[in-house]
Amino acid sequence: MSVPEPFTDLEIKTADAGFYENYSTPIALISKGIMVALVLWALISPANANSTLGSWNFKLLEVFNSFYVIIVGLFFFFLAIVAIIPATGRRIMGVPGEKPEFSNFSWFSMMFGAGLGVGLMVFATAEPLGLWGSNPEVVAGAVEGNSPEALQSAYRFTYLHYGFHAWAIYVVTGLSLAYYAYTRNMPLTIRAALTPLFGRLMNGFLGHVVDVLGVVATILGVSVTIGYGVSQFIDGLYAITGMEWIMDLGGEVPTPSKVGLISGLIVIMGLSIISAVSGVGRGVKYLSNLNLVLSIVLLGTFVVFGSFVFAMTTYGTAMVDYILHFLSLSFNAYGPLSTEAFAAALPAEAQAHAADLVGGATNAWGSFDGFKSGLEGAAAEL
C-alpha cells in the first residue's frame, strides 16, 4: 500500500496592505476582541472573573489532569526515539545546505529566555519552598511537610516541573512548527502542525479556531510572566534604591503599589515593544545574549558568596532522584475521585460530611493545611 503524499496546501488569506499586511485580519481581530473582553471583565468585575475563570481552570484540570501528565511523559520518550534513530536524529530543519541564521550561543540564549525567562527568577525559589510544604509525597503521608525528609521530594517535583518533562513540551511544539514552516514551506502557525491529523479542515473554520486559541493562549501566558516580572522588578528596585513611592508600606510587609506596578509595566512593556519591533535578529537576539550573560554572572556570584557546596550536593542528589523516579513521574497520573467514590472511601463517621469534604480534598491546587483551614462546623471538628 502506497503512503499518500502529505498535505501541504494550507491556504490562509492575509491582508495585502494596511496595518494587518501579511497577517490574517479575521484571526487578529477575533483574538484582540477576546483579549479586550477578558481585560474589561477583569477590570469591571474582578471577583466574578476570578471565581469563574478559577472554576473553569479547576474543571479543565479535573478532566484533563491524567491526560496532561501522561502525554508529557510520552513527549519525552517520543523525542528520545527521534534523537536516537539515525535517520531522524541527524535531520536538519530547513532547506538542505542552508546555514543557520544564528550562532549556537545566540540560539541557546533565545531558547533559554523564551523557555524560562521571568519564571526562572520567580519560581527558582518559590517552587522548591512551596513543594517542600506540600507535594504528593507529603499529601500521601510518606513524609512530613517542611521537614528535612521532605526536601528530597520537593526537589524531585521541582525537577519534574522544570527538567526534561518541561523541555519536552517546548521541543515538541517548536519541532512541529519548525518542520512544517522551514522544511515543508508552510505558514508558521499552530494549524500547520495539525495538518497531518485534520488535513484540509485546517483551511477553514477549524483552522481559524486553532490559530485564535494559539494567539490568546500565548498572550495570556506572556501576561502571567509579565505580571510576575513587574512585581519582582519593583521589589528589587525598592530594595536597591529605597524609593518609597513605588511601594505600599501600610501592610505587614512592603508590597508594590499601583503606581509602582503601572510604572514598572510601562518600562517593561516599552522595552518589550522595542525588542519585538526591532526583530528576532537584532533586539531579541541582543537582549537574549545579555540575559544569558547576566544569568551566568548571577550564578557566579552565587557560587562565590552562596552556600555552593550545600546547593550543588542538593541539586546533584535531587537530579539523581529525579532520574530514578522518571518513569513513575511520567506516567503515575492521579485524577480526583468522583463524589460517590470519595464518600465510599471515607471512614463511617465522616461519610455524612462527604459533600463538605470532597471539594477541598480533591482540589488540584490545595494543600492539607489549606484544606483543614477551609472547613467549618461539624466537618472542622471531625
Image: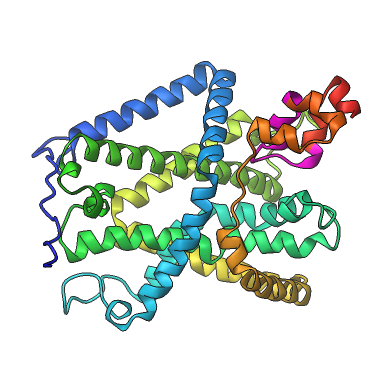
How many badges with numbers are in the image?
A: 0
| Colour style of the rendered protein structure | rainbow
> Is-magenta flag for residue 364?
yes
> Is-magenta flag for residue 33?
no
Magenta segment's dominant SS is: helix
Quadrant of the rendering where the N terminus is positioned: bottom left
Q: Please tell me which residue lies in front, 3 or 31.
A: 3
Looking at the picture, does residue 43 appear above or below residue 194? above
Image spot of residue 131 (x, y percent): 72, 53
Which residue corresponds to the image point at 57% horizontal and 71% vertical from the top-left?
296
Which residue corresponds to the image point at 89% horizontal and 29% vertical from the top-left?
382
Looking at the picture, does residue 10 appear above or below residue 61? below
Image spot of residue 43 (x, y percent): 51, 21
Which residue corresponds to the image point at 36% horizontal and 57% vertical from the top-left?
173
Q: Please tell me which residue lies in front, 328 or 148.
A: 328
Residue 245 placement: quadrant: top right
Residue 18 placement: quadrant: top left
Looking at the picture, does residue 220 appear above or below residue 332? above
In the visual, does 2 lie left or right of 202? left
Residue 100 placement: quadrant: bottom left
Which residue range is magenta in the image? Answer: 355-369
Image spot of residue 113 (x, y percent): 46, 60
Residue farthest to the right?
A: 381
In the visual, does 342 lie left or right of 82? right
Image spot of residue 312 (x, y percent): 71, 75
Residue farthest to the top?
A: 44
Which residue corresponds to the image point at 64% horizontal and 58% vertical from the top-left?
124
Residue farthest to the bottom?
A: 86
